Amino acid sequence: MTTTWTSRSKAELPTGLAARLAFRAGLDVPSTVGVAPGFVQANLVVLPRADAHDFLTYCLRNPKPCPLLGFSEPGRWDIPAIGADLDLRTDLPRYRVWRDGVPVDEPQNVAALWRDDLVGFALGCSYSFDDVLAEAGIRLRHAELGVNPPYYVTTIATTPAGRFAGPLIVSMRPLSGADAIRAVLVTARCPHAHGAPVHLGDPAAIGIDLQRPDGGTELPLEAGETPVFWACGVTPETAIRHARPAFCITHMPGAMLLTDLRNSAMALP
Amino acid sequence: MTTTWTSRSKAELPTGLAARLAFRAGLDVPSTVGVAPGFVQANLVVLPRADAHDFLTYCLRNPKPCPLLGFSEPGRWDIPAIGADLDLRTDLPRYRVWRDGVPVDEPQNVAALWRDDLVGFALGCSYSFDDVLAEAGIRLRHAELGVNPPYYVTTIATTPAGRFAGPLIVSMRPLSGADAIRAVLVTARCPHAHGAPVHLGDPAAIGIDLQRPDGGTELPLEAGETPVFWACGVTPETAIRHARPAFCITHMPGAMLLTDLRNSAMALP
């Protein structure tokens, strides 16, 4: 079945746990945008123990694109610190399975593929800070249009760790000057979700042509708007393509892991 | 005598009090930039009691251009909360005397003009946040060139109080994207010195032509730079021109009141 949560009344909106249980039971949604508002959403990366140390190092060296929320013990599918009764094998709407750095399948669960050497990583994601920005009264055109914001490969290199390396990928939101200032302040308080922007203004300064996004939907600037660029979760995906691990599982783009963490509690004072 | 403090070694640099005593003794400097580093500098406005309530209201309604540091009891020339042994009549390098909203004199002290109905207001000034930005490692072209940053009259109206009214005036600093983001964060912690910017990016959105500053020195944008606009202390001066009080004293532009307050202690955590 395919449905959206956003059409429900606020009282019916699920918690992170309720959403996980629904996905575990087979609920299929194209996007987790708007699911369990206020709860932190996460990118998922699952790697064999042999690759896990380098990937963990990569995350710690690149905290803006890869904000580490938690990771599992080798072989275990739970991460108690971020969610009760969490099962990484079944609790996301859809997964992507990678072999040698190439996506090969997009199943609804990965129970049959689980191995006792796998480590699951949960990384903060921009869906959480879009939540925070919207609550701060900042208009987000991509949300109004119901599309994903455009993302771009930059000329900024991430700090490598082992075979994990590659360019910093950024998403772009066009904002008025006053909203850009407010967005810097609001997102700086959210290191769990990419934190403050990495650039604003001239796209060419970081090797970007606004009209040629590498993904998402182009959002032409309107009068008075400045492009504001945040580190993006496509960065670790690109590092995985670069590293070509023999086996890997991630979330399907747009279909995130819902956690029990609350954005309000994760934000810095 | 005319000299600069900035050529001295750090150990010799004066405190706010030492600077005030030197100016009281007759030291004349064209600018207080770099004097008593780390100490908060202030714009001065002195008005008769009859106008003081409206001006105080104007400051409280427009805290970004008019960040109120303190004000004196009617007739008194001290403000103990911001400086020990402070004498508003003598402790600034130079003053401007206004009659009916028009500058008529620029004396080194105003002891002979003092009246027992005068109230002195100390308002935070951008010299303090330039200090903070420089300490945060942000390059400021106007400081490198030894000029004042350009300022502009905007199409944004301040909130009037009595006869005090007028446009918001902003100063502009051209910054790289990364520095603009850092500058937003650093200056937001300094509400005592104009706080976070009021605009960044498209100058036309607030009625500005960058090539036509209303004062200061034009700073053409270099590649990759975004113009960042902060509320400016010329705003209350413009409100005074608009209100045309029968009598008023201010600092001479560039020649500020040094306080005993420290930027580091005034910044929000």
Image: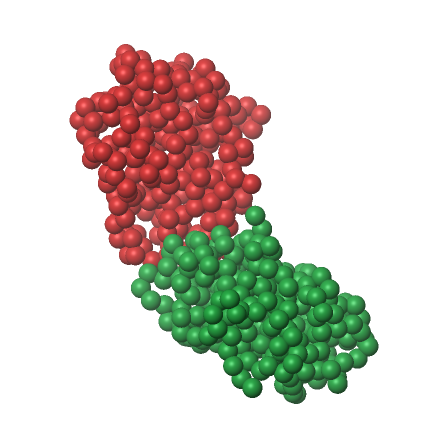
Chain colours: A red, B green
**Above or below A34: residue B74:** below
Q: Is residue A224 visible?
A: no
State which quadrant residue B23 falls in.
Answer: bottom right
Q: Residue at x 70, y 74 (%)?
A: B88
State which quadrant residue B89 falls in.
Answer: bottom right
**Relative to B70, A13 lies left or right:** left
Q: Residue at x 54, y 54 (%)?
A: B188
State which quadrant residue A221 falls in.
Answer: bottom left
Q: Nearer the viewer, residue B115 or A150?
A: B115
Residue A186: where, in percent of width, then height?
Answer: 50, 45
**Above or below A131: residue A252:** above
Q: Residue at x 25, y 39 (%)?
A: A160
Residue B263: where, in percent of width, then height?
Answer: 57, 59
Residue at the outermost front position? B11
Q: Residue at x 59, y 60 (%)?
A: B262
Residue B110: where, in percent of width, then height?
Answer: 71, 82
Q: Nearer the viewer, residue A1 or B112?
A: B112
Q: Nearer the viewer, residue B159 or B28?
A: B28
**Relative to A245, A146 lies left or right:** right
Counting labels gives 0
**Relative to A70, B152 lies left or right:** right
Residue A258: where, in percent of width, then height?
Answer: 43, 25
Q: Nearer the viewer, residue B72 or B153?
A: B72
Quadrant containing the N terminus of chain B in the rendered view = bottom right
**Relative to B178, B121 lies left or right:** right
**Above or below B159: residue A96:** above
